[in-house]
Image (cartoon, rainbow, N blue to C red):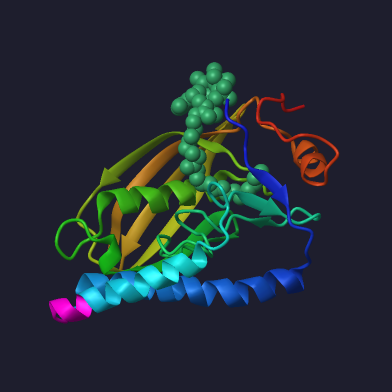
Amino acid sequence: MSADMDFRLEDIDDAEIARRLSIVEPLTDSVRDLVDAVIRTEVDDAELIAARTAIEAIVTRLRARQKDKGYGVAFTRDFTGMPWGNAATGARNAVAPPLRLSKVDGVTRGDVVLGAAYEGPGGHVHGGIAALLLDQLVGETAAADNMPSFTGTLTVRYLRPTPLGPVTLTGRVTGTEGRKTFVHGELSDADGVTVEADAVMIRPKSFPSRDQISAAITGHDTPTADKPTP
Ligand SMILES: CCCCCCCCCCCCCCCC(=O)SCCNC(=O)CCNC(=O)[C@H](O)C(C)(C)COP(=O)(O)OP(=O)(O)OC[C@H]1O[C@@H](n2cnc3c(N)ncnc32)[C@H](O)[C@@H]1OP(=O)(O)O
């Protein structure tokens, strides 16, 4: 990796994380609802123009204070990550469906409903969205001890069109070789697998260690992705 990773400390506890999520998740849900409503509404032009004016006023209010770039990944002192801008899972990102994954007995699994915002072929899931969700799946499947691997190669096979609606993702590690982890992932509807993926996930040789990230976010060092991992 050549670019610096955007790590920062949020010196808060689990109760404060829960409090913040209780504010931002409903906001993000409302924005998702807005996106869906804009796609599917059949109101007349005057209503569409009035809606735009109202939305622009909200955007102006939110832009009163903004971060310079993306949300980045914040950590607590005990290394709880808050990747709230993540495109697939982010609690603050209305683009994210959002996908919520958990690992049980070596299998990563998540259920998500893909609505009108994720359409490609009429009534069906966009291939890029399937790849996005599978990329996140293989990333979380390969991640160990909260330290990520990066996707080196993601090979996606579209077996049949995925209808919009509920889908399930499952992933498992199929092997490891040095810094490489091989992962197989599947996206399924009620009738079975629609898209499958195989990934080569790589723990970069230059990624900072967990100790280096901890030191960086607590102000004892400068975070950089260019430091060799011990
Ligand atoms: C701290 C924060 C915690 C956060 C919370 C944790 C929760 C965790 C959830 C995260 C979930 C994220 C899920 C999204 C996952 C993405 O989307 S990641 C973003 C997309 N991917 C990228 O941007 C990667 C860009 N590429 C790179 O950074 C670098 O090229 C790579 C892939 C890290 C490799 O760099 P490198 O370490 O310098 O690799 P290098 O030493 O040349 O090669 C090592 C080995 O890998 C092989 N290799 C190299 N490149 C490739 C490749 N592209 N394909 C296949 N094999 C390759 C080499 O042949 C070599 O193999 P061996 O000779 O050892 O057999």
Q: Nearer the viewer, residue 227 or 66?
A: 66
Q: Give whichever of 147, 192 is nearer the camera.
A: 147
Which residue lies at the image location 62% right of the left edge and 50% below the top edge? 73
Q: Horizontal and vertical percent for residue 2?
A: 58, 25
Which span of residues is magenta-colored? 43-48
Frontmost residue, 226 versus 150: 226
What residue is at 61 percent from the left and 42 percent from the top?
148
Magenta includes 45?
A: yes
Q: Report if residue 147 is visible in the image.
A: no
Vertical arrangement, residue 54 with respect to residue 148, above or below: below
Can see residue 167? Answer: yes
Q: Is residue 47 left or right of residue 228?
A: left
Q: Position of residue 67 (x, y in %)?
A: 58, 53
Quarter of the picture holding the N terminus? top right
Above or below for 87 versus 35 = above
Residue farthest along the right direction in this orientation? 220
Q: Toward which corner of the image does residue 166 lie, by quadrant?
A: bottom left
* Of residues 152 and 217, the one drawn nearer to the viewer in this rendering: 217
Which quadrant: the C terminus? Answer: top right
Left or right: where 77 falls relative to 4 = right
Residue beneath the point at 50% across and 49% down:
172
- Magenta portion: prevailing SS class: helix
Residue 69 to residue 57: above or below: above
Give the x, y percent position of residue 18. 68, 73
Q: Is residue 161 magenta?
A: no
